[in-house]
Image (spheres, grey):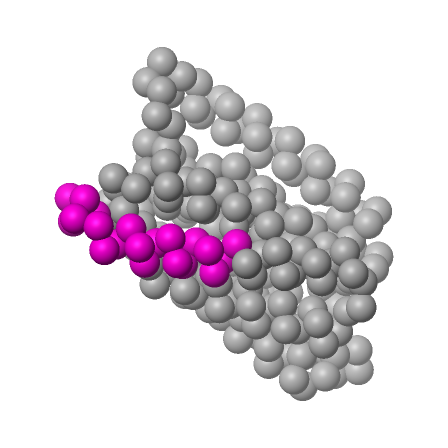
Amino acid sequence: MSSLINLQDYTVTEHVMFAVGCLLWVFTYVIVIKNIIKHQFVEVPVVAICANFSWEFLWSFVFQTNMGELYVWGYRVWFLMDCFIIYGLFKYGDKQVSIDSIKKFFKPVTAFCLLCWFVTLYFYIKNYDAPFTHMGAYSGYILNVMMSALYITLILRMKDSIGSFSYLAGWFKGVGTLLITIFCFLHFTDGFLLTMCVITGILDATYIYLFSQLRKQPLSAT
């Protein structure tokens, strides 16, 4: 791929929506990494990290988007940042587990989860995603629906630790995904994909609303 951005298959508006959305995800990662260092806690759900890390590795080094070289390296930046998040997951991720007796199994179970996502996503992307979307939309939004739902369950389950979560990261993630959703509505017509886009938006809005309510509770100051 020689061109920095593909203007034959994608319009300037589509590029702007997608690029800004991706940039907001970079900001999200920066905040998550900062909070891992500060709080020794990973605010992203465990299963979502495993799936996301696998997706970013595959789209960085196995498959390649046709949107342009800028995005090829953009995906790789995501992956490099996610390397630190996966490190934080193995170091501090067991704090998301509420049952002490199973915490000792956290690391092997997480490693197995990673392996499962790598294999499953490889075959799904190869057969059902890359040949049709050329940039990971199907697999990406399947993971996004799962991730957005798990964020809600995690923050409700760990509301006593609300201080370790970032409200700003929730907004960056939500708005970033919304801009990518607009890109999808501009570029794709498949009802399955667009339905996942809408569901993700609803879940992200729900997470932000619940977070704002939990922040108001006296317990959130602890």
Q: Which residues are magenta?
A: 203-222
Question: Horizontal placement of 109 versus 98: left or right?
Answer: right
Residue 174 at what x, y percent from top left?
48, 63
**114 to 184, vertically: above or below:** above
Image quadrant where residue 196 sits: bottom right
Residue 116 at what x, y percent from top left?
64, 31
**190 to 111, vertically: above or below:** below
Q: In this orientation, which residue lies closer to the viewer: 213 or 169?
A: 213
At horizontal 31% and vertical 55% (from top left) the residue drawn is 213
Q: In this orientation, which residue lies closer to the viewer: 116 or 70?
A: 116
Residue 44 at what x, y percent from top left?
42, 45
Residue 173 appears in view: yes
Quadrant location, the N terminus: bottom right
Image quadrant where residue 16 sits: bottom right
At horizontal 79% and vertical 78% (from top left) the residue drawn is 9
Question: Horizontal placement of 162 versus 115: left or right?
Answer: left
**Residue 83 among magenta residues:** no
Q: In this orientation, which residue lies closer to the viewer: 167 or 69?
A: 167
Q: Main secondary structure of the magenta part?
A: helix
Residue 55 at what x, y percent from top left?
62, 48
**Residue 217 among magenta residues:** yes
At horizontal 74% and vertical 79% (from top left) the residue drawn is 10
At horizontal 18% and vertical 44% (from top left) the residue drawn is 219
Number of numbered callouts drawn: 0
Residue 60 appears in view: no
Going by the picture, which residue comes out furthest to the top? 101
**171 to 92, vertically: above or below:** below
Quadrant location, the C terminus: top left
